[in-house]
Amino acid sequence: MSDPPGDNVLVTGALGQIGTDLLEALRIKHGLSSVIASDIRHSEGNKIAEDGPFVVLDVLETEEIIRVCIDHGVGTVYHLAALLSATGERDPDLCRKVNVGGTVSVLEAAKECSLKVFSPSSIAVFGPDAPKHALQDSILNPTTVYGETKVTGEALAKDYRNKYGVDVRGIRYPGLISYKAPAGGGTTDYAVEIFHSALGSGHYQCFVRPDTRLPMLYMEDAITATLTLMDAPSESLGIWKAGYNIPCLSFTAKELAEAISRRIEGFSCDYSPDVRQRYADSWPDSIDGSIAHREWDWSPNFDLDEMVDAMISGISRG
Ligand code: NAD
Ligand code: SER
């Protein structure tokens, strides 16, 4: 393979929930001008993205990705552009187009320009036939289109590694909880929205049942996991590098509401499940991340109480 165009970093889908936090962390790590943010949307209003280089980039445009990588001396791409589960199930064709088509475009650019790639997967790769505590090698039979696109994304990553030697790494992110950007249309969005409602009106109407238990993680932990995986020596990573289960939290919607009630007097939550309940029910309650822990030595810092404290203080600071 040829040398990459440079050492700089490109983030696709940078204006989203993860991109906003990841961009900030990458700019601290590599320097402001070395990290190029991109999204299909313009960056107006996103202070973190506006602080450094930003380009409008549709991930379906392979030639544009290649041009940006060459023009900006990019060597690594964090590929975050996608449609999440709730938005994706509303428009399955667009979900397949962006999630699968966008990943192919980025991997084609990586093949062409010898780029290293981070391409996230999701706990949505698992379906109802997986154990409720899903192992790294549990069966992948998702019942959502979004989940199917994530299984395909992992398969594409393996294919480009085996056929073309592209270094593609990924994490099966659990539901991520953060305050710097809104959640982007997923099933786990209730675990973010609940904080804004608690601090705003003091009441939240949750769209899943109180006993809904899902794997979750505070964003700061997700970002350190991502950077740790990308820094890990290639030799230490085994066959799961396209989509690692990682160690994370697991709690019910009711346990989350109770943890918030203990901190915000008078907070109340009621439950009115909608279609997203079906997606949540098809996913595991928790995942086993021991292979990731063994291969690249990562575990989370925030438990449920620490995450709730961090969210309340982050939102309150504004
Ligand atoms: P998000 O919806 O918040 O952000 C996605 C961004 O992609 C948006 O800013 C959107 O404008 C952009 N985008 C959409 N179509 C595009 C296109 N054609 N070209 C360029 N940009 C486009 O999503 P997120 O939560 O930041 O998720 C990022 C990645 O992590 C996705 O692959 C998602 O599946 C995965 N993931 C997220 C979570 C989570 O809880 N947030 C959990 C598991 C996996
Ligand atoms: N948090 C994501 C979603 O709910 C899971 O990939 O869609």
Image (tube, rainbow, N blue to C red):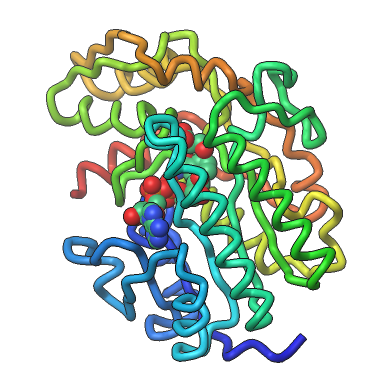
Residue 24 locus on image (x, y percent)? 39, 66
Vertical comparison of 63 with 268: above or below: below
The residue closer to the viewer here, 94 or 194, is 94
Q: Is residue 306 visible?
A: no
Percent of width and height locating residue 238: 86, 55
Residue 310 at x, y percent in the picture: 37, 41
Occupied quadrant, residue 203: top left
How far across and how far down the image is residue 207, in percent? 34, 17
Tell how many labels.
0
> Which residue appears at 60% of the width and 24% of the height?
143
Which residue is depicted at the point 42% across and 9% down? 210
Does the image show residue 274? yes
Which residue is farthest left? 201
The answer to whether 189 appears left or right of 266 in the picture is right
- The answer to whether 293 appears left or right of 279 in the picture is right
Camera-nearest residue between 276 and 62:
62
User: From what the image shows, is residue 185 above or below residue 161?
Assistant: above
Q: Is residue 232 left or right of residue 72?
A: right
7 vs 307, nearest the viewer: 7
Left or right of 308? Residue 70 is right
Rendered image quadrant of residue 313: top left
- Residue in the picture at 67% in, 41% down: 151
Looking at the rendered image, the quarter that the N terminus falls into is bottom right
Q: Residue at x 61, y 36 (%)?
A: 148
